[in-house]
Amino acid sequence: MNALRYPGLTSLVVVAMFAWPALAQQAASSTNVKTNFTAVESAHNAANAQPGPRTVPGRSIPVPDTVSPQLQSAIAAPYRVPAWNANPRSVSEWKELVNKLADAGAPGRAALREKLGVSIQPAVLGGVKAFILQPKELPAANSNRLLVHVHGGGYVYNPGEAGTQEATLMAAYGGFKVISFDYRMPPDYPYPAAMDDAIAVWKAAQQMQKPENMAIFGTSTGGGMTLAMILRAKQEGLQLPAAIAPGTPWSDLTETGDTYKTNEWLDNILVSYDGYLTRAAQLYANGHDLKDPQLSPIYGDFHGFPPTILTSGTRDLFLSNTVRTRRKLRQAGVEAVLEVFEGVSHAQYLVPEAPETKEAFTEITRFFDTHLGR
Amino acid sequence: MNALRYPGLTSLVVVAMFAWPALAQQAASSTNVKTNFTAVESAHNAANAQPGPRTVPGRSIPVPDTVSPQLQSAIAAPYRVPAWNANPRSVSEWKELVNKLADAGAPGRAALREKLGVSIQPAVLGGVKAFILQPKELPAANSNRLLVHVHGGGYVYNPGEAGTQEATLMAAYGGFKVISFDYRMPPDYPYPAAMDDAIAVWKAAQQMQKPENMAIFGTSTGGGMTLAMILRAKQEGLQLPAAIAPGTPWSDLTETGDTYKTNEWLDNILVSYDGYLTRAAQLYANGHDLKDPQLSPIYGDFHGFPPTILTSGTRDLFLSNTVRTRRKLRQAGVEAVLEVFEGVSHAQYLVPEAPETKEAFTEITRFFDTHLGR
């Protein structure tokens, strides 16, 4: 079936690449649109006349006008080459790319902390390097509360301070003290190093604050690890946090789930599973079964999980990861709130300048405020 | 911009229609897939290298294996021709089509009532024809509760008993007594007839039961009308129900919202706004502004709305209608729960045989049980 995913595409793409610029110079006319639509309608009624896979036409999809101008800019942005389709051939090539991307974002992260009034301090918890981020004035209601942040980046990106941007947003919009930890990553340290670090940090955090006053949160790989941390904490008989917020979690490292296909090429952050994701999954797993619940927590047992809030977007390649995770939580009797933002691709609710970002973190803050002790 | 939505498509479609059957007979090989992917990757990196609309390739999208076999069958089903793209040229052609579709479903609806043990009785409320549906044994906890159901069908489909299927599911899975009313529809009765009937039914229902023991629910057009009923009840100073469940509501009759485009051709129920929907909207509005909040409730004021649960799916053309409505409810301080089902097209959580349907109605039941008095 896979060989037929792009039927006739080699020739179609060649036609398309040359046909589009020419067409773009034609004056737009509604006659053209209607002729266009009628042709597509007739071809796709025919192509979808039997039970089976869905055949959809290639097309140009406008930037939605139903979101803020700041989010419109993010949605309109080009694919992130080479981040999305990186294919380093050696350990040194991986490191070079990872460091280059991390360095490129450093000035922006510093400016964001300055703008939002968030401080950052290096720390070590349970032998793991970490950062403590907090607003200049911690609200009294949150003085006995502590959040643990797990950064994203496909288990390869965002080492060191590069992993802290989401923690800055949470500290600022929620008024929380946040520990963001710098787990070990491949190629030097494949699975289970990241999870060993995560659980060491969770144990150490419990020396700082009561678990019922704490939450764990993170996006993408950070969301998947948040879920895996709860599975492992259950196994080890550790206390659990009062709530968790896995954002668009990479809960399934295999390409399983409808939006891996339906939102492919539409999501301008991840673009396709066949980009760096597939290589990062292999690099991290290092021969382990990708469906082991410590790697793909969707295959774990969610009974007894803390109340959970999940965030995704309508264009997110991981929308299925998000809604499958939520449904499984609900089936296990867990309170699980779902946030889906209009037009948002993978993790795009983290765009610092968009008002939707503040809304997303305000929803998470309300949820934590309901469930965390004081 | 619209003229460029299907760039070069007239020629591409012709190529595709002839190229696909030939390709389908080639043996699948992973070499083909990789060659295919590399070509698509390179073409689409180029096509998405500047800020602007998103260019996505035509492709074949498999039926997801992450849902029940029954739902897989529904997802695999062909487009519903002529339901989705109906274009009747006269009043009599509209009536002929509407009645044909209604009649075709009658045996299935009767069998469903029989299987689920739900009775149906005709009634008249506030001068409006209606049906009362209830399970053979009404649970004691629900004996003083009453639900009002607003059927879907784009303001043109599902007259009479044809509009009651969702009420059967709610009565059976929730154990509720349900009033399903048969509002007047175009072409004979355009706006505001349907809303006049709806508000007359709501007034009459309050003579049967206390509003705090009642909820209003419905899918698609029924979801849009549910929202419009609350807006109008607020305006008229009527009491509100304790909760509402607008499923994938047609909250915006204009083609506004990202998934009108992103899920076009993917949703096998509605397929495209440029099918019957655009004609039904005009027929219903009959010259009224489509953005009047009584027609497109997304443009209304949601402050003071009752707690709301909304249901949609990842392939739903109205996923944006759903999440935009929810976000606006949250901005107005209203409790609003979101359910998004994996792989589900428009209103496909109503497929009677799928376990996901029972899950969807069980979630709505829990929500009503939390909010309705006894």
Image: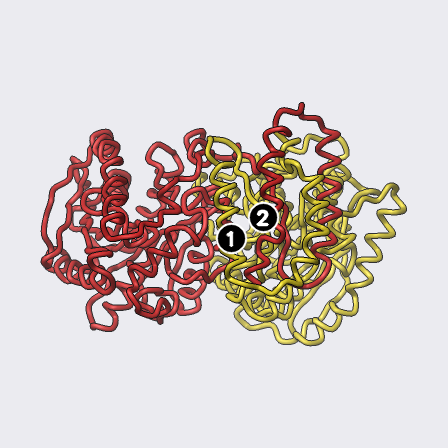
Chain colours: A yellow, B red
Q: Is residue B371 left or right of residue A153?
A: left
Q: Position of residue A51 (x, y in %)?
A: 46, 31
Residue assigned mark 2: B10
Chain designation of label 1: A
The residue drawn where x is 50% and y is 66% is: A66
Q: Residue type at mark 2?
A: Thr
| Depth check, front residue: A132 or A93 | A93
Chain designation of label 2: B
- As drawn, the label of residue A35 is 1
* Residue neighbourhood size for the residue with mark 2, other residues' Cα within 10 Å, grouped as few (<14), some (14–19), many (≥20): some
Q: Is residue B365 visible?
A: yes
Q: Residue furthest right?
A: A92
> Does A157 appear above or below A332?
below
Quadrant holding the N terminus of chain B: bottom right
Under circle 1, the secondary element is helix
The residue drawn where x is 55% and y is 66% is: A356
Q: Position of residue B311 (x, y in %)?
A: 39, 50
Q: Are marks 2 and 1 in contact (CB under 8 Å)?
A: yes
| Depth check, front residue: A127 or B269 | B269
Under circle 2, the secondary element is helix
